[in-house]
Amino acid sequence: MSGHSKWHNIQKTKGAADAKRSQAFTKIAREMIVAVKEGGSGDPNNNSRLATVIAKAKAANMPNDNIKRTIDKALGAGSTDNFEKVVYEGYGPSGVAVIVEALTDNRNRTAPEVRHLFDKYGGNMGASGCVSWSFDRKGVIIIDNEDGDLDEEKVMEDALDCGAADFEADGSIFEITTEPDDFNAVTAALEGRGYVFAEASIEMVPQNYIKLTSEDDVKNMTKMIDLLEDNDDVQNVWHNWEQE
């Protein structure tokens, strides 16, 4: 899967993610509000960033009513939500590269919380750019063919025909990658052909991966990622730990 093991990480935590669906929706809503305000439009046809977030929301099974309500809230004259994007970079145990993307209304709250988790679990927060050079920004679309209803060759043909950059299969998981600027067009085209996504978002994909051999490092890295993802301000945690 392009050396990209993120879906396996998602599968591993899927039960926990389902249990925290409300928190996931809250984070997507925050991202949507920022997209509307920065893009100046609640119409995804005129706001590419909003279109990207909506694709992510649909893949997460966020109800259409929630999506519409969030957009309406962001467009409302009385909306006071004011979030800014902040990116933290650093290292986990044994030099695992970690990128933390946050949307916060208070940097003075978020930065110390993120730094504390890096420090507590055997890592350290570094300067901006210290690890992002080793990641590529890509659109990633995951289709789960667990039921075996889809033909791999047909999905690959459709994906490439819709403008995808690459397609790879790993068992029942189909991973479609795109250039970031092509992501919205590819997702729309594939949806038009009836495909349903298990995940669809623009991600930071590692160029290489690190395996952890120490049981303590594995425990600390797992705990650090879990607690970072539990933080209300944190939207995404990208890393190059190759989980078994």
Image: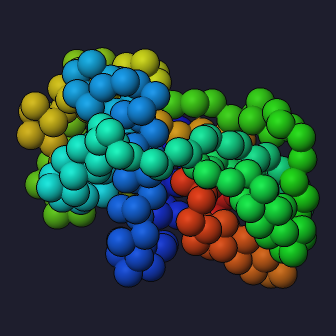
The image quadrant where one finds the C terminus is bottom right
Check the image and name the residue furthest to the front. Answer: 78
Front one among 47 and 40: 40
For this view, does 124 lie left or right of residue 51?
right
x, y percent for residue 203: 53, 40
Looking at the image, residue 240 lies above or below residue 244? above
Q: Is residue 14 visible?
A: no
Q: Is 80 positioned to the left or the right of 191 in the image? A: right
Identify whether 136 is placed above or below 168. above
Residue 215 x/y as whole percent = 80, 81
Q: Is residue 72 visible?
A: yes
Residue at (26% x, 31% y) in the render:
42
Q: Nearer the viewer, residue 226 or 10?
A: 226
The residue sitting at 40% across, 62% down in the picture is: 26
Up-down relation of residue 133 to residue 238 (above or below): above
Give the residue displayed 32% in from the left and 39% down from the top: 77
Image location (x, y in percent) of residue 111: 78, 56
Residue ID at (79%, 76%)? 220
